[in-house]
Image (cartoon, grey):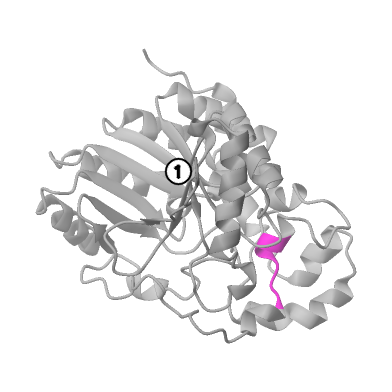
Amino acid sequence: MNQIIPKNMTSVESNWQKELSMSFTTLESLLQYLEIDTKIATQHNDARKLFPMRVPRHFASLMAKGNFNDPLLKQVLPLRAEFADVPGFVSDPLNEQSSSTKGVLHKYKNRALLLVKTGCAVNCRYCFRREFPYKENAMNKSQWLASLKYIEDDSNIDEVIFSGGDPLMATNEHLAWLSEQISHIEHVKTLRIHTRLPVVIPSRIDSSFLGWLRDTPLNKVIVFHINHANELSTELKENIALLRSMGVTLLNQSVLLKGINDSVVTQVELNRKLFDFGVLPYYLHLVDKVKGVSHFDVDETEAVKIMSGMIKRLPGYLVPKLVREIGGQPSKTPINLNLQP
């Protein structure tokens, strides 16, 4: 059955790039939009030197006006706390900067991750790649061909993951070219895309994007990065329906963040709403210990308590796996919940 892409989607073609260019990049402008005292900015502005600020207007529109503690705002708000020098928090917690093949991270035996595009539409302050040398990993076509050859030469790889930055920062033409090349590699069966862009700028799911996604013969999986129920907008729900109509498997992974989503109530609300939208919970990550994010870290003992509460209130298919990434390990490390019968 052929999927029909709505004609009215052509009117939003490339609008996402315009929206991206209009993002908030200063703390003062965002606080002014949210009707919060801009004097606060003077206390925290220096944190932008550690990691630039970028907040799309759609994402800002989902924040509550006048609320400095809004859970969406707290994810993108530069704070002086980022300067804290905390033992165990390092520049490259997952040992990713030692990859031997440019543009490829091959941490898992049967999966290869391609750094399709540097940068993101939104700069989340807890980002584990906030110090990743993206400029050094920018690729030209010959380098992309070398990366694809690496995948072709390893028959163990049956899944390719588009990552970044955010892979959907790339043009649809580049995404289509990459996926076409991958589809010609016999042992690769699945294309997975990890993205937050459609959450913060829903118009990114335009007709051209849907067209190349529809045409690829690979199994298609999209993993959204959504941390709070308030991020799930009406516009996103409409786009999710289109993706589902094309047979795309839709999953979500979250990060457990102190003061943002570290309660049973918040997690239950998020995972129920994800299901209402047609997305299944996949992973709940403990914070990766990169420098500057210690104020987001939730103690593992507390995380286990939250998971225990979720298990009591949700069906099993709506309970994500609690995991931590450890540099050098061949897979994500599940956290032992030690639940008693």
Q: Percent position (x, y) of residue 194? A: 43, 49
The answer to whether one can see residue 256 in this image is: no
Q: Is residue 271 above or below residue 56?
A: above
The residue that label 1 is drawn on is 223
* In-front residue for pair 100/299: 299
Q: Percent position (x, y) of residue 162? A: 36, 50
Residue at left offset 68%, top offset 67% = 25
Q: Is residue 170 magenta?
A: no
Q: Percent position (x, y) of residue 133? A: 40, 75
Residue 121 figure quarter: bottom right
188 horizontally vs 178: left or right: left
Residue at left offset 22%, top offset 64% = 143
User: Most extreme residue toward the top, as rendered?
Assistant: 1
Residue at left offset 44%, top offset 32% = 210
Q: Percent position (x, y) of residue 170? A: 43, 53
Q: Is residue 16 above or below residue 118?
A: above
Q: The N terminus is located in which quarter?
A: top left
Residue at left offset 62%, top offset 84% = 84
* In-front residue for pair 33/71: 71
Numbered circles on residues, count: 1
What secondary structure is marked by label 1? strand
Q: Magenta span covers which residues?
A: 74-79
186 horizontally vs 327: left or right: left
* In-front residue for pair 53/292: 292
Residue 50 figure quarter: bottom right
Amino acid, disc 1: Val
Neighbor class of circle 1 (other Cα within 10 Å; few <14, some 14-19, many 20+) is many
Q: Is residue 20 above or below residue 132?
A: above
The answer to whether one can see residue 215 in this image is: yes
141 horizontally vs 89: left or right: left
Q: Is residue 45 above or below residue 271?
A: below
